[in-house]
Image: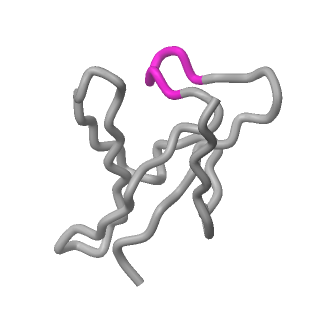
Amino acid sequence: MYPYILSVFFGEVQNDYQANLFNGDTAIVFNTDKNIPYAVFSDNNGIIKEIVCSNLAYYQTAYAVAVHKS
């Protein structure tokens, strides 16, 4: 069911620098009219990027998201 939230998961030390995605980045996943899921990411500068989920190397569904204040 769409939309849902996913979290990029690269393990402990691996990131995708070409896609500018890093371990723990989260996105909202939507579905296109052709039934192709795509993830919508927003960075700290408010730049939005859309990536088709099949182009993401590693990700997992985020069932819960916690915000920690430090």
Which residue appears at 36% of the width and 77% of the height? 2
In the figure, residue 3 lies in which quadrant? bottom left
Q: Where's the C terminus, which quadrant?
A: top right
The relative height of residue 49 versus residue 28 in the rendered view (above or below) is: above
Which residue appears at 32% of the width and 48% of the height? 40
The relative height of residue 37 versus residue 14 in the rendered view (above or below) is: below
x and y, in percent, of residue 7 in the image? 57, 50
Most distant residue in the bottom direction:
1
Which residue appears at 58% of the width and 27% of the height? 22
Q: Where's the N terminus, which quadrant?
A: bottom left
Q: Between 69 and 1, which is closer to the camera in this rendering? A: 69
Q: Between 56 and 68, which is closer to the camera in this rendering? A: 68
The relative height of residue 14 versus residue 52 in the rendered view (above or below) is: above
Most distant residue in the top direction:
17
Magenta region, main secondary structure: loop
Most distant residue in the left direction:
33
Most distant residue in the right direction:
12
Which residue appears at 62% of the width and 69% of the height? 63
Q: Is residue 31 magenta?
A: no
Magenta residues, as a range? 16-21
Q: In the picture provided, is 64 more to the left or to the right than 27?
A: right
| Total numbered labels | 0
x and y, in percent, of residue 47 in the image? 23, 27
x and y, in percent, of residue 15 in the image? 64, 23
The chosen color scheme is: one colour
Q: In the picture provided, is 35 more to the left or to the right than 63?
A: left
Q: In the picture provided, is 58 more to the left or to the right than 30?
A: right
